[in-house]
Amino acid sequence: MMNRWISMAVGIAVAVAVVVVPFGYAITGLHNDVLMGAGCGVAIGVGVALRGRSPGGPWTGILIGSIVGMASALIAGLLPGNPWGYLVPPVLALSVGLIRVRDARLSGYREMSRETFIASILLSVGLLPALIAMGVFSHPEGMNLNRILLPWMPVGFVPVMALIAGLLSHGHDGWRDTRPPALLLAGAALPVALLIFMFATGRLDPGIRIWQMAAIILLSMFVLPAAAFLVGRLAITWLEPRLRIYGHLADYLRVMWVPIGGFAVGYLTIIVLFAGFYGMLERFSPGAFGGAGASAGITDWLSFSFFTALGQDFLTISPDSVGARLLVGVHLILSAGWVVVLFAAVMTSIGPKLERIARQQGQD
């Protein structure tokens, strides 16, 4: 059981990183911002999947982790200076929104506070790699209270995020509480009061005006988190039922794996074979190909053969002579014929197996 959990966690982490890291570098060149997005996405994705709350299984974890990671990388990349206070509330609210609020276990402020707390712990763990890379814990002045508490900043936003999520969810079926608990209201007021104090004393953006301070607090603590929660809730409500099919994807892949491999081997064989034909024709009949054909090497001919098999033009090489065009036509016919023939053969051989899997899943 433990080995299965570890392998699933590693698979989810790799899948989320493959999605988030390129997206992050497309936004910013700062490694810490990309690491922040990838860390948050991996932590949330793995945590959601391991809790086993979704029928989609690992696929839902990959989806949620990718969304959270891309949102974190986007905010961190667009707002310079590693704005922890601006990043954590919307990302935390988005993470909570991506948990299905129609679940019977999310039927009150207590359950919503629990889920928000768990999401905050996961975000704290996800922020640790970026903090370590930034040298927060290896400062020459040594550790202090601010550096110790910085990784756990998401936990401080739990009450206000749980309150917002509860107020936006109390209208759905099965919600028990009509009013938020007084303790939750008091806890939600603390981070707001702390922000007001830090703005008023000049510790955050000294010289800021009162109306600017009110606008920043309203947007960062209420408006953006509420919007992020609603976006997450609508997204997962629409996507999760459609992700259930991926939970059975492994059954189909086990049946299709050998035919897919056979198709790839045959297709690549045709590409390599005709790459040799193209190069030999140009060697013995100079000028058969225009563009860079006269100086083309094996990699150029492989690229030309690959794009020809797909029915696409290759920009640097073009067939000019009658023999070259005839060879390209034969290549296209063989490539298309290979697809049609193999597809028919595969469907004939594995069709009964796929039908049996579909019937079994329908019964389940």
Image (tube, rainbow, N blue to C red):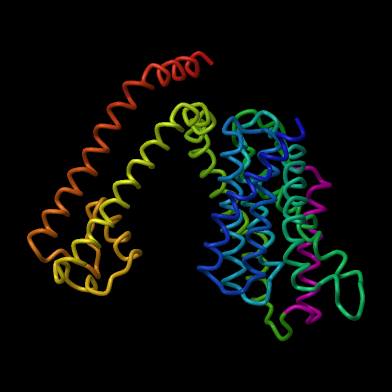
Query: In this view of the protein, which residue sits in the foreground, 93 or 201?
Result: 93
The N terminus lies in which quarter of the figure? top right
Q: Residue furthest left?
A: 322
Q: Is residue 331 above or below residue 352?
A: below
Residue at image location 58% in from the left, 39% down from the top: 60
Query: In this view of the protein, which residue sits in the foreground, 248 or 144?
Result: 248
Query: Is 182 inside the magenta-drawn segment?
Result: yes
Residue 197: horizontal and vertical position, in percent? 81, 72
Left or right: where 1 falls relative to 17: right
Residue 188: horizontal and vertical position, in percent? 77, 55
Residue at image location 52% in from the left, 62% down from the top: 23
What predominant SS class does the magenta segment belong to?
Answer: helix
Left or right: where 43 falls relative to 322: right
Q: Is residue 52 above or below residue 190?
A: above
Q: Residue furthest front?
A: 284
Query: Is 200 inside the magenta-drawn segment?
Result: yes
Q: Is residue 53 above or below residue 138?
A: above
Q: Is residue 286 above or below residue 45?
A: below
Residue 149: horizontal and vertical position, in percent? 85, 64
Q: Quadrant of the rendered structure where residue 127 is?
A: bottom right
Residue 287: horizontal and vertical position, in percent? 14, 71
Residue at image location 56% in from the left, 52% down from the top: 67
Left or right: where 346 falls relative to 278: right
Query: In this view of the protein, which residue sits in the foreground, 143 or 336?
Result: 336
The C terminus lies in which quarter of the figure? top right
Q: Which residues are magenta?
A: 180-204
Residue at image location 76% in from the left, 63% down from the top: 192
